[in-house]
Amino acid sequence: MLLPIGIDYRNVQSSEPFDVLIRTMAAGLTQHCASLLDCYVTLDKAHGHQRYGSTYEVHIHLSVIGFSIVASRSSEPNDEGLRGAIRDAFDSAGRQLEDWTKKTRHVAKYGRSDLDDLS
């Protein structure tokens, strides 16, 4: 099943390489969770200092059955820029999705939502 992906560029010119990167990383999230419904990504460039550059913000909103996951990351002016912020945001979203999947499996198996017994 193809995952519906929305990409919104704010103060950033749209770019095919970024679209490909986002679609590839979003497709990778489907291996963590089969009940992933959609993915919406916002790329934003904050106003920065002309000498040091601008910071970029990446916001990811994932919808799964009965739950939403939101991950955000910002890049520093001297970091890897927008590509690094996209990668970090998807890594964070992937970890949150794994945690949610573990929690729902635990509830289905044991009938309670506490995760203290998993360690």
Image (cartoon, grey):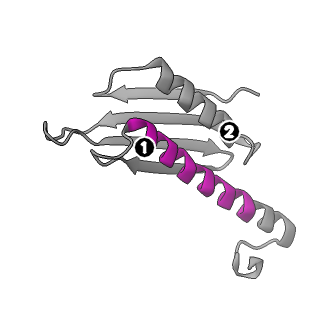
Would you place residue 63 above or below residue 2 in this image? below
Residue at image position (71%, 26%) is 2
- When asked about the image quadrant of residue 99, the answer is bottom right
- When asked about the image quadrant of residue 101, the answer is bottom right
Residue at image position (76%, 81%) is 117
User: Pointer 1: what residue?
Assistant: 85
- Side of 85 where 114 appears, left or right: right
Residue at image position (66%, 45%) is 64
Residue 43: image location, x then y, percent: 39, 34
User: Counting residues from the N terminus, which is met first, the one under dot 1 or under dot 2?
Assistant: 2
User: Of 84 and 66, which appears nearest the observer?
Assistant: 84
User: Pointer 2: what residue?
Assistant: 28
Residue at image position (71%, 71%) is 113
Residues under numbered marks 1 and 2 in contact, where contact means CB atoms less than 8 Å apart = no
Would you place residue 113 above or below residue 6 in this image? below
User: Of 90 and 78, which appears nearest the observer?
Assistant: 78
- Side of 41 where 113 appears, left or right: right
- Mark 2 residue element: helix
Residue 114: image location, x then y, percent: 70, 76
User: Of 2 and 12, which appears nearest the observer?
Assistant: 12
Q: Majority secondary structure of the magenta segment?
A: helix
Judge whether residue 102 is colored magenta. yes
Q: Amino acid at mark 1?
A: Ala
Where, quadrant-wise, is the N terminus in this rendering?
top right
Residue 80: image location, x then y, percent: 39, 42
Identify the residue at the far left of this view.
Answer: 50
Q: Amino acid at mark 2?
A: Gly
Range of magenta residues? 82-103
Of the numbered discs in the image, which one, if any, rests on residue 68? none
Where, quadrant-wise, is the C terminus in this rendering?
bottom right
